[in-house]
Image (cartoon, helix red, strand yellow):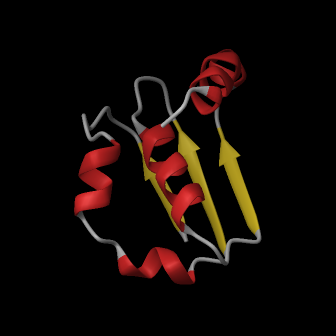
Amino acid sequence: MLLIIKQKCGFDMGYWKLKNLTFINEIKYFMIELSDGSDGVTLAKYILGCAPKSEKVDIICSPQNLEEFKRKFREPR
């Protein structure tokens, strides 16, 4: 599964939980590209927390945003 989030969408964790995305239980691999101003970190954290079968995750971001995204991933949901 490839997810590309290019614009800030304003969706928080509650939004993704309400969507009841049943396919997440079947995800074994996903790749997400995080861009500047993206809310993709929230979506990626949601998928990571709800995908019990996930075996591999690739998260792509620009070098200038790496530290910011690492900090966001360490923040509690």
Q: Quadrant of residue 40?
A: top left
Q: Is residue 66 above or below residue 32?
A: above
Q: Position of residue 51 (x, y in %)?
A: 57, 69
User: In which quadrant of the rendered view does residue 65 lie?
Assistant: top right
Residue 20 versus residue 66 in the image, above or below: below
Q: Residue at x 31, y 55 (%)?
A: 16
Residue at figure coordinates x 57%, y 45% from the top left: 33
Residue located at (30% from left, 39% from top): 12
Name the foreground residue: 51 vs 7: 51
Q: Residue 18's quadrant in the figure?
A: bottom left
Q: Would residue 6 appear left or right of 72 to someone viewing this image?
A: left
Q: Nearer the viewer, residue 63 or 40?
A: 40
Task: Out of 30 and 52, give the one closest to the viewer.
Answer: 52
Quarter occupied by the N terminus? bottom right
Which percent across, then down, holds residue 22?
38, 80
Q: How many marks?
A: 0
Q: Horizontal placement of 39 versus 36: left or right?
A: left
For image coordinates 26% across by 41% down, the residue present is: 11
Residue occupying the far right of the picture: 55
Query: What percent of the width, then of the height, locates residue 74?
Result: 65, 28
List x then y, in percent, for residue 45.
Answer: 53, 47
